């Protein structure tokens, strides 16, 4: 099961008030429902490829809609053998949709705006969350937290729906970007914190925990790998630096010029020959063990003097 489907099923497992049920169904029906006209009148078709989603939608519908609901399963043979679960509302459909501010019978169009005028501010926010959840269940998707590409989107057939939803969510501090692709308008967010907050907004707390745990574990793993890579790089750099310094010291010895160096530089040269891979910090410690007070900066300066002497040989 995809992470997006886990989120949708979790949302529908909550207990809702009657107002929240109406708003969730309103968001779902507007962007999932298909109005069909038959000899017996209008019918409304709702579909999902999740049995749990369609069963929960059915349970919510039964508390609000008093007409007949037919349940069917359609087997899809193309590519993969998937099943589509379908609900068909066949009685008093137009009346039901009109009553709950989903469909305008005069214009024969869905009503995009929410009908929240009679509610107070707190209840408006709760109902907006339920409405948004219904839309997400209908046309939403979110990438698995296992991937490094954080992405949550709502996909609409009409641009005005995308504009309206983006405007509503902006009031709740969600900055959805909008793009048109293949005759569809997509509202999306990509930042991990925004995706996590939007899952919280829809009350998908278990999914939020999974998302955050996976993200944190990956970040920790990435930081550990980064530190390991830095250590490897530093070791390689120290090894290369040590090899170059040893070549210079051996060149000075070969030409009997070691006495040209200061006593400190001579001690450092001997320690470097004995410890080819030692870092400057380790060389500082070894020098101090021989009662020679010196810092890493001092060691660096001594090696510059050694290198300068080696470079003069042969001139």
Image (cartoon, helix red, strand yellow):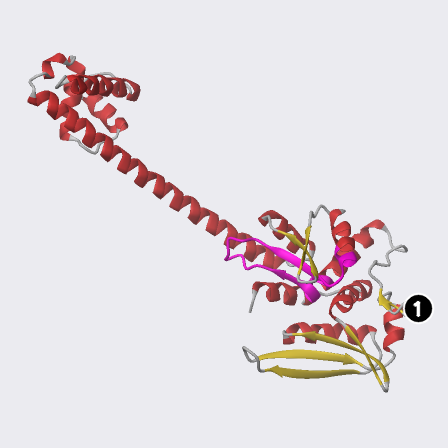
Residue 68 part of the magenta-drawn span: no
The residue singled out by tag 1 in the image is 106
Question: Measuring 90% from the left and 56% from the top, which residue is drawn there?
Answer: 118
Residue at point 65%, 65% (across, down): 8
Where does residue 2 sit, x and y in percent of width and height? Answer: 56, 66
Q: Residue furthest bottom?
A: 39
Asked if residue 141 lies in the magenta stretch, the reply is yes
Q: Is residue 75 visible?
A: yes
Start-end of magenta stretch: 135-162
The vertical placement of 67 against 119, above or below, is below
At 79% across and 54% down in the image, what residue appears?
164
Indicate the quadrant where residue 41 lies.
bottom right
Q: Quadrant of residue 252?
A: top left
Q: Position of residue 21 (x, y in %)?
A: 78, 66
298 vs 151, nearest the viewer:
151
Q: Quadrant of the N terminus?
A: bottom right
**x and y, in percent, of residue 235 in the image:** 27, 37
Within the image, what quadrant is residue 188 found in? bottom right
**Residue 182 image position (x, y, % from top left):** 66, 62
| Residue occupying image coordinates x 86% and y 59% | 115
């Amino acid at each position: 099961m995809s992470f997006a489907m886990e989120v949708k099923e979790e949302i529908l497992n909550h207990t809702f008030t009657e107002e929240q049920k109406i708003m969730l169904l309103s968001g779902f029906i507007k962007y999932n429902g298909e109005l069909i006209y038959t000899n017996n009148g209008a019918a409304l078709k709702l579909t999902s490829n999740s049995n749990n989603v369609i069963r929960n939608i059915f349970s919510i519908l039964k508390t609000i809609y008093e007409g007949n609901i037919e349940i069917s399963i359609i087997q899809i043979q193309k590519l993969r053998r998937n099943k589509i679960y379908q609900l068909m509302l066949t009685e008093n459909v137009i009346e039901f949709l009109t009553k709950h501010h989903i469909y305008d019978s005069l214009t024969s169009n869905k009503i995009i705006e929410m009908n929240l005028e009679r509610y107070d501010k707190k209840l408006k926010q709760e109902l907006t969350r339920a409405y948004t959840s219904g839309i997400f269940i209908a046309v939403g998707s979110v990438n698995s937290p296992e991937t490094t590409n954080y992405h949550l989107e709502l996909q609409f057939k009409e641009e005005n729906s995308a504009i309206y939803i983006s405007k509503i969510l902006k009031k709740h501090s969600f900055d959805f970007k909008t793009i048109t692709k293949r005759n569809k308008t997509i509202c999306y967010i990509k930042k991990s914190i925004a995706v996590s907050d939007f899952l919280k907004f829809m009350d998908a707390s278990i999914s939020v925990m999974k998302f955050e745990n996976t993200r944190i574990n990956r970040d920790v793993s990435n930081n550990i790998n980064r530190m390991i890579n830095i250590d490897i790089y530093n070791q390689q750099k120290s090894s290369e630096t040590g090899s170059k310094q040893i070549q210079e010291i051996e060149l000075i010895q070969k030409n009997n010029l070691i006495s040209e160096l200061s006593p400190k530089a001579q001690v450092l040269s001997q320690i470097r020959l004995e410890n080819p891979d030692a870092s400057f910090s380790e060389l500082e410690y070894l020098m101090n063990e021989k009662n020679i007070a010196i810092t890493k900066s001092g060691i660096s300066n001594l090696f510059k003097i050694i290198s300068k002497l080696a470079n003069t040989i042969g001139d």
